Image (cartoon, rainbow, N blue to C red):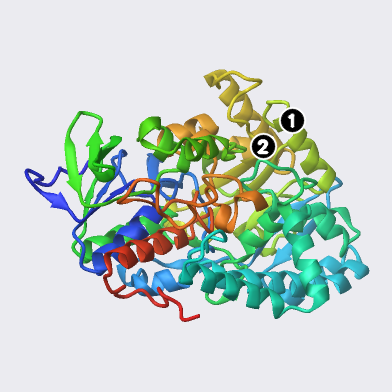
Amino acid sequence: MTPPPSTAGKVWDAIVVGAGHNGLVNACYLARAGLDVLVVERNDWVGGAATSRSLYPGFLYSNCSYVCSLLRPEIMRDLELPKHGLQVVPYEGGVILKQDGGYLGTFRDHDAHRREIGRHSLRDAEAYDRYSAEVIRQCRFIRPFLLRTPPDPTSLKPRDVQELLYLGRKFYDLTETEMADTIRFWTMSIAEFLDEFFETDVVKAGFCISGIIGTALGPLSPGTAYVLLHHYMGDVDGAIGAWGFARGGMGAISESLASSFRASGGTVRTGASVDKVLVENGRAAGVVLDGGEEIRGRLVVSNLDVKRTFLKLLEEPQLPADFVRKVKNFKIRGSSGKVNIALDGLPDFPALPPSAPFLRGDMHFTDSVERMEGAYDDWKAGRWSADPFLDMMIPTTIDPTMAPPGKHFMSCFVQYCPPKVEGHDWSDAERDGFAKTVVDQIAEYSPNFKDLILHMEVRTPREIEAETGLTEGNIFQGELTFDQLLFNRPVPGYAQYRAPIGGLYMCGSATHPGGGVMGAPGRNAAAEVLRDLKKPAKDMSDAYPVL
């Protein structure tokens, strides 16, 4: 816990609620522009879902988020995060282990990946180039919008009109066929999209993964093709779609942000849970902590999700009734769990060649779209998946600092895991049953795995929400469906990071462009705050793009 700074009679220029990565990004930019900024965090550590914690002697766990790619390079550059200790190490690929004893390797290198696909289907290997070109084309279309504030399509303000014209020009630069393909892509399922390129179950399953991660939808659900695109929009060392490990776990990202923030004169106060936003004369005037302490600020920026911000920190009569109704209808449905495991050694996977690099990437055990959809069927029935999809990694194969010599840390992201079990809250026994399902699936492919387990941390949506404050454990603070993107995120009319109450802003993943350890919502919100204050955006590259 950070000792509270002296606040007697003090009025901060800005108070940021929540020291998750977006809150810290936002605070960094505001502090660099000369504002006196306080970040308040209810936990005794910073990071939200991007944390590294020691829960077993000698081991460092990436508790929730576990891989890095989406963090915008512009933010890393602006805030000098490498100078503050951030190092991202790319991994080369991964593997899908099949039920019949075979496997499909995945590689960062395009040609190597194409040759591996060819082992299963020459036709799919030929289609891989077409698939890659189409996905990259979609990425290039959407990436320029990530660090731009969405326009209000109902507004006639010059800036909104200009942004709509910018969006229109980007769209009309496409050919007629590309226009049709883009509209279809944003609304179709990932399974339908992949059917247009590939014929082999395991190949389609491999590409399907990014369409369901963190989403309360199955591979046959409309809109999941865009979720795939969302996960492809990052890069590591300039390689679009590549992923890597933050050295020291994902908490290294948050720690580097906190260090950059403090270097700019900012203050972080941990162990400070906010009970409500203080509103006076229709404007945010600070926050009230759980113990009743008032902290005054000229403006407040909330990094919490939209439901927690407006349904818990404010009273309904303080907000427009129509706005409250839309917030209540905003889709935040938990679908994921996490199992973190300390291992006494490296597990054996007999199906893999001894010299293969696959253990140094992501490993999966779901080899068909049908199995993924079956796992989703369990979620719809209110059960954790009997045959879950696991995104399993052993970061210590690349970053040995996270475990003692010879030991390893394993991270298992699990789909699907409901926020409630058949309508009731999770019990500890059900949590243990969920963990057993995960362990049993891994053990089917690794005979010595169970004998290596030293410790496990098991997180259902109950545990994720309790620690990180993510409603229902939803890692994106709201689903990434077409009705909740761009100027509809979080709700129509309020997509420009401003709340209906003056002096109150939003900077979390519930705002554009959405979830993942990206930082773009925090940066975009800071640009809007500084615009309202008529302050220059120091150290913010392209904060006010020329149209």
Q: Residue at x 83, y 74 (%)?
A: 177
Q: Secondary structure at mark 2?
A: loop
Q: Residue at x 39, y 60 (%)?
A: 525
Check if mark 2's residue and mark 1's residue have beta carbons within 8 Å. Answer: yes
Residue 535 left/right relative to 250: left
Question: Foreground residue, 520 or 214?
Answer: 520
- Image-quadrant location for residue 414: top right
Provide residue 449's location: percent of width, then percent of height: 63, 40
Residue 486 left/right relative to 437: left
Against 288, is 297 above or below?
A: below
> Which residue is labeled 1 in the image?
378
Against 93, is 453 above or below?
A: above
Q: Residues within 10 Å of mark 1 (few under 14, many from 20)?
A: some
Against 391, is 355 above or below?
A: below
Q: Residues within 10 Å of mark 2 (few under 14, many from 20)?
A: many
Provide residue 227's location: percent of width, then percent of height: 66, 55
Q: Residue at x 67, y 37 (%)?
A: 416
> Which residue is labeled 2 in the image?
416
Q: Secondary structure at mark 1?
A: helix
Residue 255 appears in the figure: yes
* Amino acid marked by disc 2: Tyr
* Amino acid marked by disc 1: Asp
* Mark 2 vs 1, N-terminal side: 1
- Looking at the figure, which quarter contains the N terminus? top left
Residue 492 left/right relative to 466: right
